Image (cartoon, coloured by chain):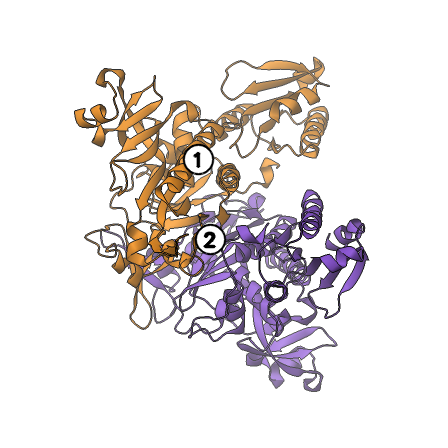
Chain colours: A orange, B purple
Amino acid sequence: MKLTNLFTKTRKTVPADEVSLNAQLLIKAGYIHKEMAGVYSFMPLGLKVMENIRNIVSQEMNQLGSQEIFMTTLQDKLLWEKTKRWDDEVVDIWFKSELKNGTEVGFGWSHEEQMVDMLKDYVSSYRDLPVVVHQFQNKLRNEIRAKSGILRTREFIMKDLYSICETEEQHKEFYDKVAKAYERIFDAVGIGKDTYFTFASGGAFTDKFSHEFQTITNAGEDTIYVNKKKNIALNEEVFNEDVLDLLKLDKKDFEKHRSAEVGNIFSFGTEKSETLGLNFTDKDGVSRPVVLGSYGIGISRLMGVIVEYFSDENGLVWPKNVAPYKAIICSIGTGPEVTKESEKIYKYLTDKKIEVIYDDRDVRPGEKFADAELLGIPMRIVISEKNIKDGKIEIKDRTKSKAEYLELNQLDFIAEKLN
Amino acid sequence: MKLTNLFTKTRKTVPADEVSLNAQLLIKAGYIHKEMAGVYSFMPLGLKVMENIRNIVSQEMNQLGSQEIFMTTLQDKLLWEKTKRWDDEVVDIWFKSELKNGTEVGFGWSHEEQMVDMLKDYVSSYRDLPVVVHQFQNKLRNEIRAKSGILRTREFIMKDLYSICETEEQHKEFYDKVAKAYERIFDAVGIGKDTYFTFASGGAFTDKFSHEFQTITNAGEDTIYVNKKKNIALNEEVFNEDVLDLLKLDKKDFEKHRSAEVGNIFSFGTEKSETLGLNFTDKDGVSRPVVLGSYGIGISRLMGVIVEYFSDENGLVWPKNVAPYKAIICSIGTGPEVTKESEKIYKYLTDKKIEVIYDDRDVRPGEKFADAELLGIPMRIVISEKNIKDGKIEIKDRTKSKAEYLELNQLDFIAEKLN
């Protein structure tokens, strides 16, 4: 893409009430647009990052044998009353409204109830199980405060995965497979090294804990205690002698960190299926409730954590897998040689299906360089008269301060680096 | 995909209150799930159809040079008050709720106001224009009645495209390009022949008319008068002597039809940009409001129209371009030869990246055939012991009653037909 074709622009200022680093940088770079407190739209570059993350998650969901569906934001009050989660005293983040005939409706902050109810239409026998479904869907949550940029918003995109199984054993096996898939996802987006499988409390019915994936970052709202040797963590709320004894862990092996939740995996047992009546006939002809699991990754939240984790004083820094474009070509000067050489590299890389930005704007070199940094594109390619005269191309990794110089004909080397 | 892996099942009955043909068929075939009146979730096969339609639309949007974004459902009351569209007396389909601090918020039934306001952050000069953006987004509309299945729902996926231009001339040129793109889209999904560029009234500020694309179908909620010779139509509301005179058309060349709106293209002139303050500095240094156009296609509505247009007494009928799978392999009998041959064809086609269903269920042939028809898959491939003994494969087009017989080794011929 040529930068003169992109309608967004980088900017120096952000809305005065914007206190979070991730939102400040993403707004400055034109990736997101603030609509209201805690409500952000995704501009072309931001949407591309989200799609890249989504594709990584999608692949793992398909590997798990999950089938993708798309449920509605509008939620039936009657369903949520059955599980006692309609009341604002119980769930304090509902947005609610009403139909013209006065019927109250809710706006989906979660989809477990709706999912379980829907599956009643298709599941009746042990032969139907297990069933695994997922969706990418926008959730609406009436948060009291929204101060962490896209880490905690009133509207966000979530991948929610659900499993229903015959037995606890079948459930446990799948649950562990999801945990492994989540690890691969966090590795793929670049934060695996500092992301921990974390024990947390949380109303699990079949186990003492629920589990989260927490990434170490100062922007996080949580506190975890990390055991690097065992590669696990405990959420502050369960970091006590009882739990440590139960897990046979030693307090002194843990260090305290600020962290952000990037995923959760959750066993519901049979509680919700009993209440909502999602039963199946087992091999012996006996009717039993299914065992439910639910597994979430906030796609936009994950994007925010990646920003917080990698960014530096010059702006965003995207890992190659999630970057909206792999490289940015900065042409310095407007001479015919510079334009010709820039166009040539641009064509060479795009022909190879490598997505690159060509900064073809007529602005000062300093502005091009500053924007290339702010945008966080993994590789900067500089084409200047001086470089051409020397027969060189200059490339610089976003995470390094020193440039490298290649021969002008080493385009295949660049393509290889970007693939 | 093997049918035993699909969690949805075909069913004989539909909810008692479901009166529309499209929803009845889509529910029976397991493409959609009804959550409430006018609220449907998309199951795996339904989502695949939506994605196929979306991809066709996406390609045309990219061809138009549009940049994709993703805006929020939550809408700022202040913006809509400026254009006097917040009041329920003016817009009677709002869903509204409030934040914890009492601030009222709306749920997006349309995005023009938000889009125009957002663009103020990025557009200031004639050099920035034109700007063309689009999104695929779920709209929420508090419809009083919802009786047309997925043609008119309380929640649906819409592609909305927006253009802002310097001048009326620049706008007109782009507007005509969109009309052409829309024609290609309706051709691609198979309804082009009976879809008409239609003159309608509708509060246009720069022209006497707005324009719609209307498809002839008895399920539609509109009435149009079609002039087949000129390949245009007039919506009932503008079918009068004055308009006919103005357009130099003759009343006797028109025939009356029921129809469904599948797209609209709309000139807003400078009215909204004036009110919301989206101005640019022109070549002479003068500040002027931009000229706005907005162009919609309801993706799920279009899916419903395709159902109504093609379906027959046996069920759904999908054109190849939008079908969730191109072919369905029905194995008749459970003998080893039948299984071997079915698996072979399944592997052959999937290796060629042709998406096919393999009905590997252990059910009666009659049930397989009935489901193949109901699901509306374009080609049915029958593998039976008798066919194998004769050295034949049986294929049948969903729209034809007679099967064809090919040699067992003519798989390349089948692949070619499906591509």
Q: Residues within 10 Å of mark 2 (few under 14, many from 20)?
A: some
Q: Chain of mark 1?
A: A
- In the image, taking residue A133 as reference, residue A418 lies left or right, namely right
Does residue A139 appear anywhere in the picture?
yes
Q: Residues within 10 Å of mark 1 (few under 14, many from 20)?
A: few
Where is mark 2, residue-wise? Answer: A128
| Circle count | 2
**Is A61 in front, or is A31?**
A61
Q: Amino acid at mark 1?
A: Lys
Secondary structure type for disc 1: helix
Q: Say which mark, if any, is on residue A234.
A: none
Above or below for B313 versus B285: below
Where is mark 1, residue-wise? Answer: A177
**CB atoms at circles 2 and 1 under 8 Å apart?**
no
- Look at 39% across and 32% down and name the residue there: A305
Q: Earlier in the sequence, mark 2 or mark 1?
A: 2
Does residue A318 appear anywhere in the picture?
no
Question: Residue B143 placed where, x, y %?
Answer: 40, 70
Which image quadrant for residue B392?
bottom right
Question: Residue B57 placed where, x, y %?
Answer: 61, 55
Above or below for B247 versus B192: below
**Is A281 in front, or is B224?**
A281
Above or below for B364 versus A21: below
Question: Residue B162 placed where, x, y %?
Answer: 54, 55
Q: Amino acid at mark 2?
A: Asp
Secondary structure type for disc 2: helix
- In the image, taking residue B194 as reference, residue A282 lies left or right, namely left
- Look at 28% across and 50% down and name the residue there: A271
